[in-house]
Image (cartoon, grey):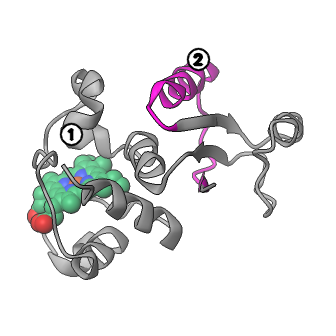
Amino acid sequence: MPALRSEIRQGAYYDSVVLMQLQRGLLTLPGVLDAGAVMATPVNLELLEASGLRPAEAPSSDDLLIVVRAETDVAAGEALFVAKGCVMCHVHAAVSELRELSLEVGPELTSYRNAPEFLRLWLSNPAGVRPKTGMPDLDLSGEEIEALIGFLNQEA
Ligand code: HEC
């Protein structure tokens, strides 16, 4: 059963209401079995442990931790599309209920497909592919990139 964890190491403070909304949003996505979006404080890590979502590596307590357990890689990729903020710049029909969040500064990705080799380069370092791109490097792990590619290239 694929489980994915994401740490966003920004050391920034995230409002607990925002995190609760993010967590609820992730839980409503199809195929998502469990999700957590919390600051990695010792108490929160214990709570994640209790639900079997605690990551193996130890993050620092001012990291934001987003943890998703999903039925399939496509479902995990979809959850990451929301959790990593892709949805802020791109519209995708699979998460159309979040359309109002989107600034629509990037292309609509519903029927977008591309070679995994290209997407690996693009998602790991957009400016390395196109120096003037408006897409930021989102500091994605290899595991996250594979799940996102599975989501983007899923069969229609
Ligand atoms: C801050 C806005 C922003 C965010 C966040 C963002 N993108 Fe983009 N993305 C863009 C823009 C703008 C483009 C247009 C391409 C360019 O600038 O050349 C783009 C292009 C793309 C493309 C098309 C690449 C091509 O040319 O074939 C893909 C695929 C893509 N983004 C996926 C993602 C994924 C997946 C995420 C989340 C991990 C994401 N984007 C997050 C702004 C964003």
Percent position of residue 45, x then y: 83, 42
Residue where numbered disc 1 is placed = 92
In three-dimensional space, the C-alpha distance between marks 2 and 1, rounded to whole angstroms, equals 25 Å
Horizontal side of residue 107 vs 3, given as left or right: left
Q: Is residue 121 above or below residue 63?
A: below
Percent position of residue 116, x then y: 27, 76
Q: Looking at the picture, which amino acid does disc 1 mark?
A: His
Q: Is residue 122 above or below residue 44?
A: below
Which residue occupies 60% across, 56% down? 2
Percent position of residue 30, x then y: 44, 32
Mark 1 C-beta to ligand 1 under 8 Å: no
Which residue occupies 42% across, 68% down? 146
Q: Is residue 120 above or below residue 145?
A: below
Q: Is residue 29 magenta?
A: yes
**Image quadrant in which the N terminus is located:** bottom right
- Number of other residues with Cα within 10 Å of mark 2, as a class: few under 14, some 14 to 19, many 20 or more: few
Question: Mark 2 vs mark 1: which is more N-terminal?
Answer: 2
User: Any mark on residue 134, and which?
Assistant: none
- Number of other residues with Cα within 10 Å of mark 1, as a class: few under 14, some 14 to 19, many 20 or more: many
Asked if residue 111 shows in the view, the reply is: yes
Residue where numbered disc 2 is placed = 17
Q: Is residue 98 magenta?
A: no
Q: How many discs mark residues in the rendered view?
A: 2
